[in-house]
Amino acid sequence: MQDTVQINDRFTVAKFAPEADQLRQAAQEGFRSIINMQTDDEDKKLKMKPREEGRLAEEAGLTYLHHPVDGQNLSDEVVDKFRRKATELPAPVLVHCASGKRSGAFVMMHIACENGMSGEEVIQKAEEMGFECDTPELESFVKNYVNGHNGS
């Protein structure tokens, strides 16, 4: 699938919000779950509402999780909840938001904590993989979360 970044055997991040045919393609390519991080009120970037995406994903044989994340209201609790839910889903998991920034950040925070990386290391690794923290606030949040959960 184009415009995706495979993080590891479990997680791939899509840098777009999939349409119906892309959900079917994901299932054909072996994905078993989809996580949609878009909020219900994300302007015109929403190609379809989460409820519709969930129905189409399930029709394609995928387990679906809507875990909305507002980039302006990030908290440790939101990341912790994502991490718990994401590890319970059948893998491999395709994670998306509108552009891949939030989904990439959340998956990278999870991977960093699982692997004992520091906040600086996860930012560097994310950039190498084609993700960028597009605001100083997001970069600071990612670093602080990872350092706080690894004792760094």
Image (cartoon, rainbow, N blue to C red):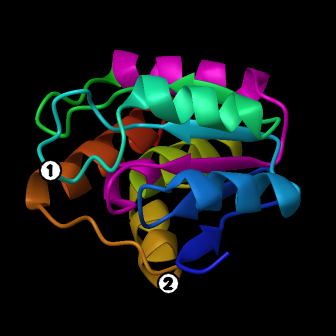
Q: Residue at x 41, y 78 (%)?
A: 127
Residue 74: assigned label: none
The answer to whether residue 116 is seen in the rendering is no
Foreground residue, 30 or 90? 30
Q: CA distance from mark 2 to mark 1?
A: 30 Å
Q: Estimate the x, y position of residue 112 in percent, counting from the top left.
A: 58, 50
Does the magenta-highlighted stretch encompass residue 98? yes
Question: Can you identify the residue that label 1 sits on?
Answer: 44
- Of tags 2 and 1, the one toward the viewer is 1
Q: Amino acid at mark 2?
A: Glu
Q: Amino acid at mark 1?
A: Lys
**Range of magenta residues:** 77-103
Residue 128: assigned label: 2
Contact (Cβ within 8 Å) of mark 2 with mark 1: no
Q: Residue at x 33, y 50 (%)?
A: 47
Q: Secondary structure at mark 2?
A: helix
Does the magenta-highlighted stretch encompass residue 136? no
Q: Residue at x 24, y 57 (%)?
A: 139
Q: Estimate the x, y position of residue 119 in percent, counting from the top left.
A: 41, 54
Q: Secondary structure at mark 1?
A: loop
Left or right, residue 88 beside residue 1: right
Figure check: 95 above or below 126:
above
The answer to whether residue 127 is seen in the rendering is yes
Foreground residue, 116 or 98? 98
Left or right, residue 98 beside residue 96: left
Q: Residue at x 42, y 42 (%)?
A: 147
